[in-house]
Image (tube, rainbow, N blue to C red):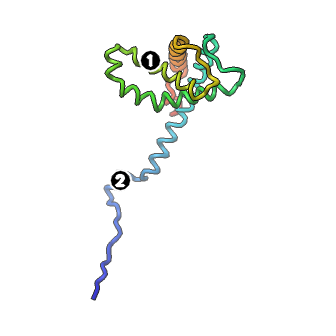
């Protein structure tokens, strides 16, 4: 005669419910609500910085289309947010040996990556890209000083 076993469903203990009361989905929404506005503000800042750099430097351009700086700003923001930290961590020895100059080259690479993805955003040479990286850093520094960090602005 075969016996069937009755198993009780596994229920999280009260302690486990206190540690994670809303589950993963609740926390991911909180994270998204914090990150997306900060990313949007960073996109705005980078778009303004790219526009200023193209306005000041004849070696940069975006043609006659009004939407190119917006798309280039978005690509530049996403590259700086997701790819640049990985490259910075992987290149820590080079950054140390060159006393930070390699980090500057990563900034220039982010501009070239933006140019590669958005071909209407043009860079004439490495030196124009290097000067643009300096101008973009300065403009972003001024915007951060005037308005605050994007994470702080999004939290308001």
Q: Nearer the viewer, residue 72 or 29?
A: 72
Q: Residue at x 37, y 15 (%)?
A: 100
What x and y, as percent, mark residue 95? 35, 18
Q: Is residue 68 above or below residue 56?
A: below
Mark with earlier residue (1, 2) = 2
Instruction: Decide: is 18 above or below 38.
Output: below
The residue at the point 51 percent across, 13 percent down is 130
Give how far across and how far down residue 92 sits, in percent.
34, 23
Instruction: Please tell me the numbered disc located at residue 105.
Output: 1
Mark 1 → mark 2, Cα distance in angstroms: 47 Å
Q: Which quadrant is the N terminus positioned in?
A: bottom left
Q: Which residue is mark 2?
A: 18
Q: Residues within 10 Å of mark 2 (few under 14, many from 20)?
A: few
Is any part of residue 14 visible from this angle?
A: yes
Q: Position of residue 86 (x, y in %)?
A: 40, 30
**Residue at 59% from the left image edge and 14% from the top image edge:** 124
Mark 1 residue element: helix
Q: Position of residue 9 (x, y in %)?
A: 35, 69
- Mark 1 nearby-residue class (10 Å; few <14, some 14–19, many ≥20): some
Which of the 4 image quadrants contains residue 54?
top right
Q: Is residue 13 above or below residue 35?
A: below
């Amino acid at each position: 005669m075969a016996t069937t076993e009755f198993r009780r469903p596994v229920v999280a203990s009260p302690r486990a419910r206190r540690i994670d009361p809303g589950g993963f989905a609740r926390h991911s929404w909180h994270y998204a609500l914090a990150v997306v506005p900060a990313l949007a503000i960073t996109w705005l800042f980078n778009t303004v910085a790219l526009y200023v750099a193209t306005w000041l430097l004849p070696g940069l351009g975006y043609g006659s289309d009004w939407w190119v700086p917006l798309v280039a700003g978005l690509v530049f923001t996403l590259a700086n947010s997701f790819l640049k930290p990985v490259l910075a961590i992987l290149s820590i020895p080079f950054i140390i040996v060159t006393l930070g100059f390699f980090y500057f080259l990563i900034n220039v690479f982010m501009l070239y990556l933006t140019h590669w993805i958005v071909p209407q955003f043009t860079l004439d040479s490495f030196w124009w890209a290097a000067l643009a990286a300096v101008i973009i850093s300065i403009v972003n520094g001024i915007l951060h000083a005037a308005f605050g960090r994007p994470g702080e602005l999004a939290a308001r």
